[in-house]
Image (cartoon, coloured by chain):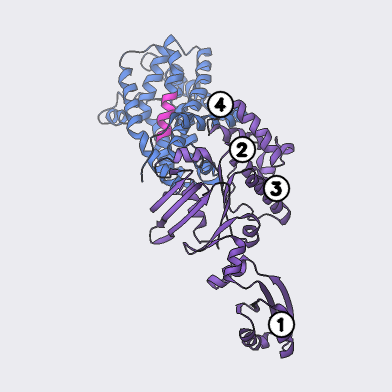
Chain colours: A purple, B blue
């Protein structure tokens, strides 16, 4: 049995009438990358904030690195790292100073901080920028610096709230690479995302959240297998033939979703489905074949797309 | 919601962060606070002073010079705990970053008190030296001025932080400075003695914080009488009584 790094039971949080998190259960094992996937407002960020003590749970149990968040939050914060969704680097300080000052909040010996800061700058490829004011960094660099900052206390668990939101693809891949290296080094990662590919790329296990509830849990591949068919055909027919095509697909495919003027047909045999559509003579403007992803799982489970 | 008792170590880390930034900008940051008292000394001490007879046996420059030390500490700590704190809270998100570390929200507030006190001490020390050069310091008791100004800084930081913890927009500080800081500056016995006025003017002055600070700085510069222990006690009790309220209110703005 793998040791548990984090455990939540019936965890809930309400702000007045609004229930942000409605009693969720989950466990994170040591050394794994655990994902929270869901649209904006699903309750992901509130859950993350409860882990690092900025939001106090309204009910239920939450223990992090074996300690109760209500009783031992200072000790928990000493042992975890936090990459917030919103950039809150100290704009008045340079890149290096940001890490040095942050290290002091953990009461680490000065020498140790200095050594670790240089290693971390190297790790996130910011050594050359170390003397720059933070405001001069690009978005991707700021995010990497936030990650380096979260590692200054050599945490056993790192919480990342949407680590790649707003980054261009190249910057994003660089962040993914760093997170994979961390995980391979044995650090437990908990991250939120509304990108399916990110969850599929990084996470060993994940939960899908919607409206403050966890609606599914499992390994990314397994979630896809259990909740959707393996292959997807996306059709964009002429607007006047949309209804006809939908009726046809509903008889031929295993499952059909409609998203605006796009029809998504889920199947185990895309060739057969394709032929059936051709035989019908319905004019199609655009067809795309792809393998099913977590996006499809979310669509299937909630009837909505992740990013609306 | 349970509040944690502030940790001095955590507060020190916040103080250290402010000191790190201050070291980078201290020259431009120090200048305005440092120069301003000179204008008062020149305009009022020399200008108005030419028309004023001695007050309590002192010439006018001597009367207002050491008293301005107290108001200088008030201004330094008030700006620090209002505009600067608000920017760190709302725009820079500096505190959001810190509360995710072993430093708790309560420690941040106490650290800011200490930092505001430190700024008041730094400005006050420099200003005391200037007063000494001008021949307005006559007592070795003046060596107690820096630590006393630290205390005055902490007191006004507690008041400023209390206001900061209650407001939603930075525009509200105009009220604080117009309705609190400026009247204190004008009616605390810096420019004219309030004690000679009919009741209830001295009694009202006695209820306000800067009045006591002025009594003490003036006395320390010229040779104190034991009466100032009452003023110091007033400041300590007032500060201690109020100190935890902003801690509680600021915690609510950082932790939900």
| Marked residue chain, label 2 | A
Q: CA distance from mark 2 to mark 3?
A: 16 Å
x and y percentages locating residue A188 in the rendered image: 57, 46
1 and 3 marks on the same chain:
yes
x and y percentages locating residue A241 in the rendered image: 67, 88
Residue B230 to residue A80: above or below: above
- Name the quadrant of the C terminus of chain A: bottom right
2 and 3 marks on the same chain:
yes
Residue B221 to residue B233: above or below: above
Residue hosting label 3: A138
| Marked residue chain, label 4 | B
Secondary structure under badge 4? helix
Secondary structure under badge 1? helix
**B41 or A251, which is in the foreground?**
A251
* Residues under numbered marks 2 and 3 in contact, where contact means CB atoms less than 8 Å apart: no
Q: Which residues are magenta?
A: B150-158
In the picture as drawn, the residue positioned furthest to the front comes out as A1
Q: Residue at x 60, y 61 (%)?
A: A220
Residue hosting label 1: A272
* Residues under numbered marks 1 and 2 in contact, where contact means CB atoms less than 8 Å apart: no
Q: CA distance from mark 1 to mark 2?
A: 62 Å
Q: Residue at x 36, y 38 (%)?
A: B245
Is B155 part of what is drawn in magenta? yes
**A181 or B108, which is in the foreground?**
A181
Q: Nearer the viewer, mark 1 or mark 2?
A: 1
1 and 4 marks on the same chain:
no
* Sequence-earlier tag: 2 or 3: 2
């Amino acid at each position: 049995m793998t040791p548990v790094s984090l455990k939540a039971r019936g965890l809930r949080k309400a702000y007045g009438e609004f229930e942000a998190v409605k009693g969720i259960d989950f466990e994170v094992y040591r050394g794994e990358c655990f994902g929270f996937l869901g649209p904006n407002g699903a309750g992901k960020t509130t859950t993350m904030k409860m882990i690092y003590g900025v939001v106090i749970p309204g009910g239920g149990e939450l223990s992090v690195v074996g300690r109760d968040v209500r009783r031992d939050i200072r000790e928990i914060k000493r042992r975890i790292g936090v990459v917030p969704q919103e950039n809150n680097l100290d704009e008045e300080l340079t890149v290096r100073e940001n890490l040095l000052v942050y290290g002091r909040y953990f009461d680490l010996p000065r020498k140790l901080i200095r050594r670790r800061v240089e290693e971390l700058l190297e790790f996130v490829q910011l050594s050359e920028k170390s003397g720059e004011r933070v405001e001069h960094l690009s978005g991707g660099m700021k995010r990497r610096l936030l990650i380096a900052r979260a590692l200054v206390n050599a945490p056993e668990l790192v919480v990342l709230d949407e680590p790649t939101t707003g980054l261009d693809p190249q910057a994003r891949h660089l962040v993914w690479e760093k997170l994979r290296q961390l995980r391979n080094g044995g650090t437990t990662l908990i991250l939120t995302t509304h990108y399916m590919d990110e969850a599929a790329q990084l996470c060993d296990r994940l939960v899908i959240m919607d409206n403050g509830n966890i609606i599914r849990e499992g390994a990314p591949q397994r979630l896809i297998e259990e909740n959707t068919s393996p292959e997807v055909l996306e059709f964009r027919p002429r607007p006047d033939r949309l209804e006809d095509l939908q009726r046809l697909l509903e008889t031929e495919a295993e499952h059909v979703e409609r998203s605006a003027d796009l029809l998504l047909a889920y199947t185990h045999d895309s060739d057969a489905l394709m032929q059936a559509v051709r035989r019908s003579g319905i004019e199609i403007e655009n067809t795309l074949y792809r393998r099913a992803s977590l996006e499809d799982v979310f669509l299937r489970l909630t009837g909505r797309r992740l990013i609306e | 919601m349970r509040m944690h008792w502030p940790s001095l170590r955590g507060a020190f880390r916040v103080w250290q962060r402010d000191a790190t930034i201050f070291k980078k900008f201290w020259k431009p940051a120090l200048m305005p606070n440092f120069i301003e008292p000179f204008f008062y000394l020149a305009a009022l001490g020399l200008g108005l002073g030419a028309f004023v007879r001695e007050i309590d046996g002192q010439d006018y420059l001597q009367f207002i010079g050491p008293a301005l030390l107290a108001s200088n500490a008030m201004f330094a700590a008030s700006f620090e705990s209002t505009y600067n704190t608000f920017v760190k809270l709302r725009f820079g998100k500096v505190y959001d970053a810190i509360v995710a570390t072993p430093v708790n929200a309560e420690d941040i507030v106490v650290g800011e008190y200490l930092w505001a006190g430190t700024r008041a001490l730094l400005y006050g020390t420099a200003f005391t030296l200037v007063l000494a050069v001008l021949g307005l310091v006559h007592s070795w008791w003046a060596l107690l001025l820096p630590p006393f100004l630290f205390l005055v800084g902490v007191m006004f930081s507690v008041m400023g932080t209390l206001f900061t913890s209650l407001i939603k927009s930075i525009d509200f500080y105009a009220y604080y400075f117009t309705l609190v800081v400026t009247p204190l500056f004008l009616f605390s016995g810096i420019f004219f003695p309030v004690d000679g006025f009919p009741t209830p003017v001295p009694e009202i002055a006695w209820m306000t914080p800067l009045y006591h600070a002025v009594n003490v700085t003036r006395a320390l510069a010229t040779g104190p009488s034991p009466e100032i222990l009452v003023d110091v006690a007033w400041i300590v009790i007032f500060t201690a009584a109020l100190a935890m309220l902003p801690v509680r209110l600021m915690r609510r703005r950082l932790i939900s």
